[in-house]
């Protein structure tokens, strides 16, 4: 992402908060996995959205109208000893030269400089609750200003920054769409690779390894923990153990996406391990495919957020009723919610820098209308858990089909369209590398 894109976003935010305001964003802290081992560092999405700065121990300050500069960055100074062990730091100099800051300071200067900036402002925009330690520190500065007496000024109000910023993030720019297309392309290649190499006798973690290989080969990382569920594990929505041996006759449900340049893909496919759907597996698969198609048709500018889900639910109810897995009229089954024993989640979510991306689904008491630039998933599913009150031949069939979709002026673009969904095409792909 070019520096000009981050500058454009900051200008947008400045117009929204206006003069006399300051927006403060801390970077994500380093997290410890165990003892002295850290989790791989990933910058806070809101912080990165405005700065493009990937380092921890940093604070961004956006203050429209300041003569000394409207975008200030506090970051770690250069340190030869630390850089020997943990890698090169940008330092304040490169924060200005390469990351667009008007001014940059060592992060240790926060206590000396930031209270003075806050004192000059009427409004402070900040997201409370994300990083409690920084919340406490910020409140300490404000309290210190209040106790200084007649010579000090304190802001008139604190405003939730996330409300404004997340509405900006909901609408994807051209550079963002480009990154999301690339993340989708890499994920498509990973799913194809896994299908080609799949065969009975593998372990779920061996299938997962095919995804990790493809992601890292293209400079991407998983955007969430991959779900590789075979047989009854396909009916566990957030299954992460990936530890079962895949058996002949199983369905395999894999929900795996990647993050490229801070933008996520989120893709699910379900296929027969031996390359041939059983009659029951194909019947359920075709119900889910019909629901996917019905939902996608509702992804249009001006449609309500709820409309794709309602279309998918109607198709699932109609299909399961035709198979004898639900009994009663379609309207009655829709009203009663009986279908939720087999289809218990929504049909999609916003997609972007976070795999479950930010943005309100309702505005007031109304569902949000879809608009060009919004990105979402379409992911209906049917899960028939062992022990369900249906004939045993249906037990353990879990099917989900999930694709990434961009709302366009003309309708929609399926970013993951290159990955087969048709059951015949899937059968032709599975095991083809053997």
Image (cartoon, rainbow, N blue to C red):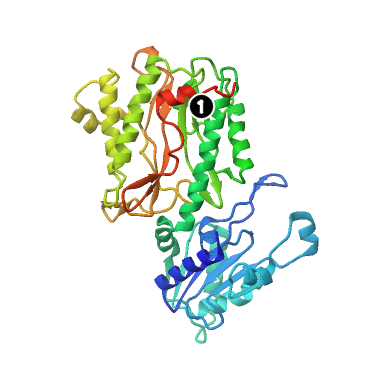
Which is more toward the observer, 20 or 398?
Answer: 398
Q: Quadrant of the C terminus?
A: top right
Relative side of 255 to 363, left or right? right
Does residue 240 show up?
Answer: no
Asked if residue 62 is positioned above or below residue 287 in the image, the reply reads: below
Q: Which residue is mark 1?
A: 229
Residue 99 occupies quadrant = bottom right
Instruction: From the top left corner, tell me how far across and down residue 314 is, in percent.
Output: 26, 32
In the rendered image, the residue lying farthest to the bottom is: 151
Q: Residue at x 47, y 76 (%)?
A: 64
Which is more toward the observer, 113 or 143?
Answer: 113
Relative side of 55 to 395, left or right? right
Instruction: From the top left corner, tell me how far across and down residue 69 is, in percent.
Output: 55, 79
Residue 336 occupies quadrant = top left
Q: Residue at x 54, y 16 (%)?
A: 247
Relative side of 209 to 47, left or right? right
Q: Residue at x 51, y 68 (%)?
A: 7
Q: Pointer 1: residues within 10 angstroms few (<14), some, or many (20+)? A: many
Instruction: From the top left corner, tell me how far across and down residue 420 is, in percent.
Output: 44, 31
Which is more toward the observer, 384 or 370?
Answer: 370
Asked if residue 381 is positioned above or below residue 413 in the image, the reply reads: above
Numbered circles on residues, count: 1
In the rendered image, the residue lying farthest to the top is: 392
Dot 1: what SS?
strand
Asked if residue 68 is positioned above or below residue 316 in the image, the reply reads: below
Q: Quadrant of the N terminus?
A: bottom right
Does residue 372 show up?
Answer: yes
Q: Residue at x 60, y 52 (%)?
A: 42
Instruction: From the top left corner, tell me how far across and down residue 410 is, in percent.
Output: 31, 50
Residue 213 occupies quadrant = top right
């Amino acid at each position: 992402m070019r520096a000009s894109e981050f500058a454009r976003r900051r200008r947008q935010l400045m117009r929204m908060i206006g003069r006399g305001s300051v927006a403060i964003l801390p970077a994500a802290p380093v997290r410890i996995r165990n003892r002295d081992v850290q989790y791989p560092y990933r910058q806070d999405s809101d912080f990165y959205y405005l700065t493009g700065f990937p380092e921890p121990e940093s604070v961004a300050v956006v203050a429209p109208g300041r003569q000394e500069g409207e975008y200030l960055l506090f970051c770690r100074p250069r340190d030869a000893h630390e850089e020997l062990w943990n890698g090169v730091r940008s330092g304040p100099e490169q924060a200005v030269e390469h990351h667009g800051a008007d001014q940059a300071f060592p992060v240790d200067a926060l206590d000396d400089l930031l209270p003075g900036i806050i004192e000059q402002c009427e409004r402070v925009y900040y997201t409370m609750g994300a990083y409690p330690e920084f919340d406490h520190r910020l409140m300490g500065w404000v309290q210190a200003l209040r106790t200084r007496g007649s010579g000090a000024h304190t802001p008139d109000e604190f405003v939730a920054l996330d409300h404004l910023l997340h509405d900006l993030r909901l609408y994807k720019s051209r550079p963002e769409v480009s990154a999301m297309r690339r993340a989708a392309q890499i994920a498509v290649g990973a799913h194809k690779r896994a299908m080609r190499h799949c065969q009975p006798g593998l372990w779920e973690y061996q299938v997962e390894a095919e995804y990790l290989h493809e992601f890292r080969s293209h400079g991407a990382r998983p955007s969430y923990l991959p779900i590789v569920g075979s047989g009854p594990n396909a009916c566990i929505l957030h299954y992460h153990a990936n530890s079962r041996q895949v058996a002949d006759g199983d369905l395999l449900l894999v929900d795996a996406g990647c993050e490229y340049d801070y933008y996520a893909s989120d893709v699910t496919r379900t296929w027969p391990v031996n390359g041939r759907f059983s009659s029951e597996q194909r019947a359920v698969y075709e119900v889910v495919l019909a629901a996917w198609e019905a939902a996608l048709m509702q992804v249009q500018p001006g449609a309500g957020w709820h409309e794709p889900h309602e279309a998918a639910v109607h198709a699932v109810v109609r299909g399961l009723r035709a198979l004898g897995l639900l009994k009663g009229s379609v309207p009655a089954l829709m009203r009663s919610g009986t279908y939720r024993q087999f289809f218990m989640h929504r049909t999609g979510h916003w997609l972007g820098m976070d795999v479950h991306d930010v943005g309100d689904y309702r505005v007031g008491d109304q569902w949000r209308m879809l608009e060009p630039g919004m990105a979402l998933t379409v992911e209906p599913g049917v899960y028939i858990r062992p022990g369900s009150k249906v004939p045993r031949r249906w037990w353990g069939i879990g099917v989900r089909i999930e694709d990434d979709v961009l709302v366009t002026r003309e309708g929609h673009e399926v970013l993951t369209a290159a990955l087969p969904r048709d059951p015949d095409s899937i059968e032709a792909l599975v095991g083809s590398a053997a």
